[in-house]
Amino acid sequence: MSEQQQLPTFADVQASADFIGAHLPPTPLLHCWKLSESLDFAYHAKCENLQPVGAFKVRGGVNLLGRLDAAQRQRGVVSASTGNHGQSLAFAGRLFGVPVVIYGPEHNSNPAKIQAMRALGAEVRLFGRDFDEAREQAEKVVQVEGYHFVHSANEPLLIAGVGTMGLEIFAELPEVDAVIVPVGGGSGACGNALVARHFNPQVEVIAVQTESAPVCYRAWKERRLDVSGPMTTRHEGLATRVAFEMTTSMMWDLVDRFVLVTDAEIDVAVGLLATEAKLVAEGAGAASLAAAIKLKDYLRGKKVVGILSGGNASPVL
């Protein structure tokens, strides 16, 4: 994390809402009544799958690229992504006239997301066996090709941007008891937690990751960054093997509970959202429901929001 970077604040989220509102409408907060009946608590889905790129990250992309100065816009940006972050930058790049290069992993990539990034005008380069190898390569080309590097998590403007979904949640459901957020890099958890702490510190912010890629969970639990773990998940939106400094340090202070679910439990949640709520979710987006099911007894009687972070489902699970 750069010494010049300051951690984002609630005021930054508010300022981001003013900026983003000109480009992105609010997303629905849907009370999933059939799921609520089976869970025995009120379950609401924050439908970020209905964003223009099908995922919450577009909030951060618009907020960050829209605030680049003229010289930075002319240089263009480079980043790494398994798909949704890349789509958010590609969308914002088209909106603000910024060239975008995205490095993605050669393996475990979602072809629909790659196609979408290219359709939005991004140059997509595939490199390495996973997201982190693609990210390392993206960082290297900055020195050679002169792009402005955009990290997928360690960016205050990204975190503040995605936190705007929290403002929408509290505007519609101020009496919420818990917010469940899927974690890949942690920007969504941090943004929502900033807002929750401001409006009601008693609201529990619950992060969720898959057992097949648990590095952020381990970093949060052990309160250190130098952790390792398996990275075998099929759900590319959760597929990280390195904990990021900015988001992890924020989660240490802001996240109340962190749970792990299995890839199989996520698959079940994808199906339930489709059949019981008529919502399309990718694996990462359904992780919040998988966690809600796992915590069913603990959450009984409460009002719960699950962040349906994305709906860019792979053609083949």
Image (cartoon, rainbow, N blue to C red):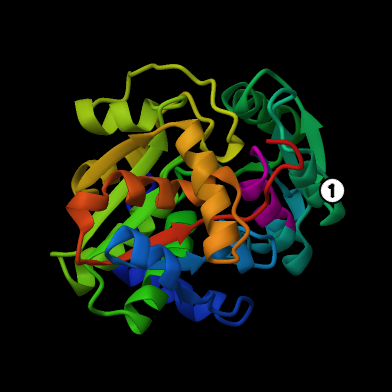
Q: Residue 81 magenta-drawn?
A: yes
Does the magenta segment cover residue 223?
no
Q: Is residue 297 visible?
A: yes
Residue type highlighted by circle 1: Arg
Task: State the residue in front, 306 or 221.
Answer: 306
- Quarter where residue 60 is shown: bottom right
Bin the neighbour count of mark 1 within 10 Å (Cα to Cα): few under 14, some 14-19, many 20 and up.
Answer: some
Extent of the magenta region: 80-90
For residue 56, say whether it is visible.
no
Q: Is residue 179 left or right of residue 254?
A: right
Secondary structure type for disc 1: helix
In front here: 283 or 110?
283
As displayed, is residue 288 above or below residue 12? above
Q: Residue at x 37, y 58 (%)?
A: 191
In percent of the image, x 25 and y 66: which residue is there? Answer: 196
Left or right: 194 with respect to 160? left
Residue located 71% across and 28% down the image = 141
Q: Position of residue 307 (x, y in %)?
A: 44, 59
* 194 lies above or below 100: below
Percent across and percent down for residue 143 are 67, 29
Viewer-side residue, 160 vs 85: 85
Task: Report which residue position mark 1 lands on.
Answer: 118
